[in-house]
Amino acid sequence: MKETSWEAAESAAWLAVRNEQGRHSIWPAGLSVPPGWSEAGYRGDKPGCLEWISENWADPRPAGVGRVAT
């Protein structure tokens, strides 16, 4: 059976990347990381990258955005 493009994307190599504000995302490992982003320390399949980000990116707000005082 032929692999679908979705299945190929799931198993392809991906990078966890981080931008200058501390936000995280995933990026195909075969492409150059875009300006303003850098490798965050994980390379693997897409589900693994998403799991790594969820474990290592504690606060999804950009750096410099404070919490509301309660």
Image (spheres, grey):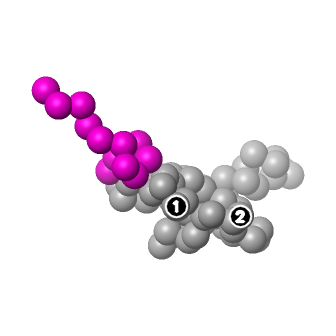
Q: Earlier in the sequence, mark 1 or mark 2?
A: 1
Mark 1 residue type? Glu
Q: Is residue 32 left or right of residue 27?
A: right
**Where on the picture, by quarter, is residue 66?**
top left
Secondary element type, mark 1: loop
Mark seen at residue 34:
2
Residue drawn 52% across the image and 61% down it: 20
Please state which of residues 40 and 36 is positioned toward the viewer in this rendering: 36
Query: Would you identify the image quadrant in which residue 67 lies?
Result: top left
Q: Main secondary structure of the magenta part?
A: loop
Residue 33, x across and y down, in percent: 69, 68
- In-front residue for pair 35/58: 35
Circles 1 and 2 in contact, beta carbons < 8 Å: no
Q: Would you identify the image quadrant in which residue 19 lies?
A: bottom right
Q: Is residue 4 above or below residue 30?
A: above
Q: Position of residue 58 (x, y in %)?
A: 32, 50
The residue under label 2 is which amino acid type? Pro
Q: Is residue 63 magenta?
A: yes
The residue to which callout 1 is attached is 20
- Tell me which segment is drawn in magenta: 58-70
SS assignment at label 2: loop
